Image (tube, helix red, strand yellow):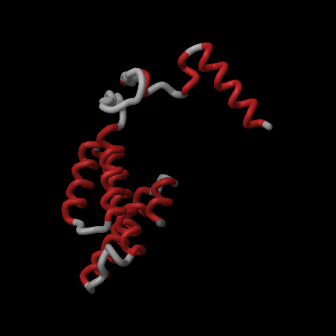
Amino acid sequence: MAARGALLLGDTAKADAYAADVRKRCADLIASGRKLKTDHDTEIALGAAIEVTAQRLEATKGANAATDYVRGELAKIDGPVALVSRLNKRINMLAMAGTSAPELAIEDFVGNRPATLSPRSAASPCCCSCGPKGAATAARRRRRWRK
């Protein structure tokens, strides 16, 4: 979508114009009887336009404004699972950015009870952060994949 490209290039005026144009075209198609559940091109275009607008809102007014916008758009859409999931993912990306990962609740397991992940360990950059043993494991993997 051109709006996403314009946004990536920092041309916010074009991004806004393209997103508004796509939104209008999608609204016209839906008004003429197109269904988002069967017209995947319209579904994808509408989702991209909503996401670009959300990204612009995040940059100008903050994540809360962008999250509220996407939630409002989601409430208006009777769309396919893919579109609803895409917009929920955007909401999660906006609302959870910068927060610690929640502790996982382990309900079922075989053998010894596994250790839970604390928010600190969940945020670790890689499996190598556990010390010498992890570094040795990572080195073995690198050697294996170089072959």
Q: Nearer the viewer, residue 133 or 71?
A: 133
Q: Nearer the viewer, residue 28 or 44?
A: 44
Measuring 42% from the left and 74% from the top, which residue is drawn there?
41
Residue farthest along the right direction in this orientation: 147
Measuring 42% from the left and 24% from the top, which residue is drawn there?
111
Position of residue 4 measured from the top left corner of the image (x, y, whole percent): 46, 59
| Direction from residue 113 to residue 133 in the image, left or right | right
Q: Work out whether residue 87 can be spotted.
A: yes
Measuring 33% from the left and 29% from the top, which residue is drawn there?
106
Residue 38 vertical placement versus 132 (above, below): below
Q: Work out whether residue 99 can be spotted.
A: no
Position of residue 71 measured from the top left corner of the image (x, y, whole percent): 23, 54
Residue 35 in which image quadrant: bottom left
Position of residue 135 measured from the top left corner of the image (x, y, whole percent): 63, 19
Q: Nearer the viewer, residue 130 or 113?
A: 113
Residue 136 vertical placement versus 87 (above, below): above
Position of residue 127 measured from the top left corner of the image (x, y, whole percent): 55, 26
Residue 116 in which image quadrant: top left
* Quarter in which the C terminus is drawn: top right
